[in-house]
Each structure stands twice: as C-alpha cells, then as structure tokens.
Image (spheres, helix red, strand yellow):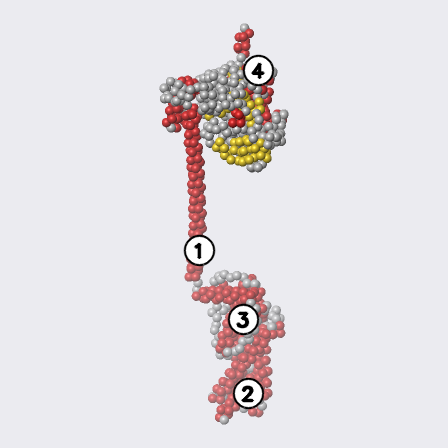
Amino acid sequence: MLNLLKLFRKEKLWDFQGGIHPPEMKTQSNGTPLSQLPLPEQFIIPLKQHIGHEGEICVSPGDHVLRGQPLTFGSGRMLPVHAPTSGTIEAIAPHMTAHPSGLSELCIFLRADGEDRWTTLDPQPDFRSLTREDVVKRIHEAGVAGLGGAGFPTATKLRGGLRGVKTLIINAAECEPYITADDRLMQDCAAEVLEGCRILAWVLQAERVLIGIEDNKPEAIAALKQALGGDRELQLRVIPTKYPSGGAKQLTQILTGVEVPHGGRSTDIGVLMQNVGTAWAVKRAIIDGEPITERVVTLTGEAIAQPRNVWGRLGTPVSHLLHHVGFAPGSRQMVIMGGPLMGFTLPSLNVPLVKISNCILAPSASEMGNNEEEQSCIRCSACADACPAKLLPQQLFWYSQGGDHEKARAHNIDDCIECGACAYVCPSNIPLVQYYRQEKAELRAIDLEAKRTAEAKARFEARQARLEREKLAREARHEEAKQRVARSDQGERDAAIARVKARAAKTPEQETAEREARHAQALAQQAEKQSETQALSRQSGDPRKAAVEAAIARAKAKKSGVAVGEQPSEAAGVAPAAEADPRKAAVEAAIARAKAKKAAAAAGEQAPEPADVTPAAEVDPRKAAVEAAIARAKAKKAAAAGEQAPASADAAPAAEVDPRKAAVEAAIARAKAKKAAAASCEQVSELADAVPAAEVDPRKAAVEAAITRAKAKKAAAAAAAEQISEPADEPHASEPSDAAPAAEVDPRKAAVEAAIARAKAKKAAAAAEQASASVEAAPESSSEVEAAASPDSADPRKAAIAAAVARAKARKAQQQPSTTED
C-alpha cells in the first residue's frame, strides 16, 4: 500500500519517439574528482567562442593583462572573451580553431607570466538587491554562453524570456556516451549549481524550476538532494536513461509532455532551458564577480592513461591537456572534440579549448570498432525509427546527396538535432549526420545569398523610389518655374500692351511734353550726380537749376495729361510737394514761358545775358511769381516795339495764377519798369548836356519829340492792355501787399535788369534814328508835329527826355554825312 502511494505521488514523466541506448562508457572518468592542470606557456584565445559575431578587440600586442580582463567587447550576441590568466599579449593573428572545417579564425596569443593574478572583481552576494536588467547585463559582461555544447549567449536567451516564461528547466541529463563533465560538476559543486539555478529563476520570474537528470548518475543525484535539503523552490526530476534525452526538445517533452512547435522555440510554450554548467557560470559571474575563464572538460578514451575531468582554461591547446593525462597516440589515432555521436574529429591537436568544449575523446582503434566502408542504402527504415525528431533520414540523405535543396528544406532538415542516432543504427555505415551538416551549411549559404539579394533589391528599389521622387520634385519645380515665367511674361505683355495703348492714345503735344520731361529729368539726375562726385568748376550745370527745370517739365507733362515716372530729388532744396500745388505749378509754367520768350528775344537782339543768373529755385516762391510777371511785361513791351516773340502753345491762362499774387507781380513789374525808365532818362540827360542846345535844329527836335511821345503812348497802351488782361479785382500798386519791395531783390538780379533796361534804351535810340531819317525824307505837317508835341499826349518829363535824345541823334546823323563827304 505504501509503494502504491509513492507511485501516485511521483511526478509524471513522458517519453519521446525514437532514441537509442548506446554503451554509456562513463565510468572511465566520472570516478575521479575535478583537478587543476599546470598552465601552458602560451594561450590561443579565439575571438568567437559562441553563436553570433565576434566582439571588438580592446587590447594590442605588447599589453599586459590580468586574469578576467576583457579582451573584446560587444553587445547582443557579440560576447566578450577574457584573459584566462595574467600575461602579455604577443600577437593577434588567425589560427586554426575547434571546428570540423579546420579553418582559421582570428585569435589573441597570450604569453602567461606564471603569476595568474586576477583583475579587480565586483562580487554581488545579494543578487536580489540588483535589478533584473542589471543581472542580465552582468551575465553578458562575464561572457557566459551555453556550456552544454550549443554556445548560445545566455544573456540574449534570458532577455528573450523575461516575459512569458513559466517553467525553467535545468538540463542535467548529459546523455551522450563518455561525457561526464556535468556529472562531475554536480558531484563537486552542487551548491554553486543550485545557487545559479535560483538566480536564473529570479531573473525569469519562473513559477517552477525543474532539474532533469538521468538515472545513471546516482552520485550526482545524491549530491543535489543533499544541497537542496528542504528547498521546494527547485524540483529534481530523475528520468530514464535514453539517448538523446538531453536534447532541448526531447527533455522538454519528457518533463512537461508538451512538444515545441515546428520552427518555433521552447519559449513559445512558456519553457526556457539552461545547462547545469551554465547555471554554475552564472553563479560565478554574479555572486563572485568572475567572468568565465575556465570550464570542466572530460578527458577520456582508451588512448589516455589517466581519464578524468579537469578545470580547463579557455585558450589552452588540446595537446597540452592530453600531455598531462598520459595521452599515448596509436596508429591512425583520432582525437574527437565532443562525444562519439555528436562530436567531430580535430584536424590538429594545437587547436585551443573554447567555451563549448565539454569533452576530448581519444579512443583506441578497437574502441571505435571496425572502420567499415560506406555502402548503399537498403531502405531498412531503421534510421526513421531511431530519429527523435520524427524526420525521414533516408529521404533527407537522398536530397542532400543529390543537391535537391528545396526538397530537403521541405522535409524539415532544419529540425535535425544532429544527434547521430540514425548513423548509429544504419547497417550500411552511412555517415548520415555528415551529409545533413553539409546540406545545412549549403542551405545557410543559399539563405545568406538570398538575404543579401533581397537587401540589395530593397536598396535598389529604395534608390529608384528616391530618384523617382526627386524627378517628380524637379518636374514640379520646373512646372512651377514655367508658370511663374508664364505669369511674368503675361504681365509684361499686358504692361507692354497697356503702354502701346497709352502711347497710341497720346497726342503729339503729350509725347513732346513727355520727351522734354524725361530729358529734363535726365539732366537733373546728371547734374545731381556731378554735384556729389565732382568739383564746382567741373560741373556742367547747376543741379538746383536743373532740378527746377525738371520740375517745370514734369508739371507741363502732367498738365498735358502724361504721367512721367521720376525719382524725388533732394538737390537744390526742391520740395516734391510743390508739384502737387496747382498755384506753384502755374508759377513754374509761367516762369518757363518767360524764359522761352526771353531766350527768343536774346537770339533776335543778340543782347548779352549774364552767365551767373541765379536760378529761380533759390528765391521764395512769391519772388518767383513776381519775376515771372516782370518777364511777361518785358516780353509784351518788346513785342510792342516791333519784335515778334513765339507764343507758347501750352501757356497757362492767367486765371490759373492766384489773383492776389498776380496783382502783386503786376505792381512790382510796373515799379521796376518805372525805375528802368528813370535810369534811361538819366543816361539820355547826360548825353543831352554834352551837346549844346544851340546846335540843334528846332524843327527836327520837335519832330523827334513828337515821335517819342507817340512811342510813349504806344508803350502806355501796351501797359494798359497788360493791366486789362489781369483779373478785374487786381489791387492798385499803391495798396499794401505781401510783395517784397524792389530793394529786397537780389543785387545780381537788379544788375541783370539794369543791363536789360540799358539794352532797351539803346534799342529805342536806334528806333529814333530811323524815325528822324524818315522825317527828313518826308517831313510831317506842322499840325501833326504839334499834335505829337502837345503836352497832353505824354508825360512832360518823358517828352523832354525823348526830345533831348532825338536832338542828340539828329546831331549825330548830321555829322555822319559830313564825315563821308570828307
């Protein structure tokens, strides 16, 4: 009854299909405790000792390193390697490594100094005070990888199982014949192994921890039970001996009864598996702070005199290990790294020990059996019955041998765990595992090439897409530029059409005014520029005068209905606001007309004009208006004397001028005319005093006086006509006004006006001479002379002056014939 209760209490175990029971051959090495071997003189440390890429080198030849000092660094699957002892880096060069291909890989050559000194360590006895991420980081920095033979980075495996893992399985089965490294480790270091299991369980937050061990290891089972005591956090499960029960998928199925799906991982069903050697390395990395620099290695086989398990430093040459256990090679001796079913023959004994090296097997010739030749497959299906992965080894062999990669992949050759069970039971001695390994390598190469091709295609497509986007962007920019140009051209065409229409709508007078305005503006800008850059003596004209003329021309053009663009000028103090004032515009137009008449008169009379005439822009606008009125009066007076002055077609009517200012200008003009007449009378009186009165003929003098009075009347009539042309509300000259008195006029202007008066006096004298000649040729009647000399016809003073002038001219005329007769 008691035995029945124990049977019910026993945890249920499952089984997997296939498997074999080869001779165990474990007693050769598991009876001897772990031992240390002398250190070699030189270590050969491969940079890649795990699944993944090699790390970055952080040392150089000649550097002195201590034990545990990192030689490389990296992240993810780039595990670092550490110095196995203290010494000097001799070289970094390729060397043959532990691989079936016998190819060389980059290695670091370390010369040991014999001191075996540790670097500074960072132990953490209370691992629960750390965060889970910090523990995983420390495991990675210690370089811990799967020590069961796969070599997968432990930190990467833990990161993948931080969420969703409910069951942690510690693989202690060690099912392959001859290998006893895990068995001996559990016997000698059971407490450390269990402490590593607790650290892994705490990191994964696993609900249960199962330690699976085969029943052919009674000493290890006893040691683990003793170390566990009453701890129920860890559960020890003893399983039947069967090969390959130590496979990850097979042990998971045995302990949980759940199969890992095809193409999946154990984490997909909430299970994570670690090896007992890995658990020990995790404890040393966290509790002791030691990186992995050594591991337990089984040295066994009949060719070895002292089979045992030893602590082997990573990087130790295999020849050094075999030398210290009494290796006696025979003829055609082979040395296998790993077990007899999953291991591979070493191409040389100088290859170094690495993290996944759990056994060095040196069998004798009789121990390995007869080396029979490979024969043809007889289709016995023994391989299919023994396959623990439920594959068809026979078909996989055909596809692998024939190079039919697609069918080999279709028959799930990637699920093969390379346990060697099929090759062990094959009666034809076909090395099936070697074919499968070769086919897997070819498939990996094909996948790598396909991956590279896909990446290249993706880069090409990305480049094409980028070029297409750039092309579309360029076309969009070009189209936008074309539209801008088209809009600009359309605007220019519209502006040109508008200018043409405006030009067609202009009258000839408007075009003339526009040309004159542009010319005047150009002259003004040129004078302004010269005034800024050249000396006064080199300037072609007064910039202020040019600015005034340009303003006058613009006013004319605006009056004619033509808009002329200009830039406002600051020279000569010309205010732009004056152009908008209609009164000032009228004044400027009047000044321009007066100047035109004056220029015409000067051309007809050849009268000299002073060169230093001050421009009207220097005088107050009211003074300019006064001068304009004076100029008009003088022009009309010259026209009355017989000169013809061109009338400006664009003269502004007097009604445009301010009435008050026009009256003031007229009054000032009359005052100046009187002053000029007085000056001419004084000159004539001086001439008359020089000629004796007794010498003048009374009759001729009377005639000349009459003529002079007639001219005076004519001049008075002209003045009256000018006054009549002014507005009717013009104030009298004697009335007060805001006009400046004559004494306030610029002296230069006064001199100019005096010269003009003198020129006009001379002109009047010439006219008197002509009149006297006509009187001598046809004397007028006494009645006409008397009528002309009547005192009511003109001012007596002016008549006397005119008579004196006439007498002087008559005398001069009488002297000229006598001179010619002589």
Question: According to the image, label 4 marks what residue?
Answer: 222
Question: Which element carries disc 3, helix, strand or loop?
Answer: loop
Q: Could you tell me if the residues under marks 2 and 1 are in contact, i.e. CB atoms within 8 Å?
A: no
The answer to which of marks 1 and 4 sits earlier in the sequence is 4
Kind of residue indicated by mark 4? Ala
Dot 4, how many residues are within 10 Å of its Cα: few (below 14), some (14-19), or many (20+)? Answer: some
Question: Which element carries disc 2, helix, strand or loop?
Answer: helix
Q: Which tag is nearer the camera, tag 4 or tag 2?
A: 4
How far apart, in angstroms, are the residues tagged by discs 1 and 4? Answer: 104 Å
Question: According to the image, label 2 marks what residue?
Answer: 808
Dot 1, how many residues are within 10 Å of its Cα: few (below 14), some (14-19), or many (20+)? Answer: few
Question: According to the image, label 1 marks what residue?
Answer: 492
Q: Nearer the viewer, residue 110 or 635?
A: 110
Q: Residue at x 48, y 68 (%)?
A: 650
Can see residue 728?
A: no
The numbered disc on residue 726 is 3
The numbered disc on residue 353 is none
Q: Nearer the viewer, residue 180 or 13?
A: 180
In the image, taking residue 72 as reference, residue 436 lies left or right, namely left
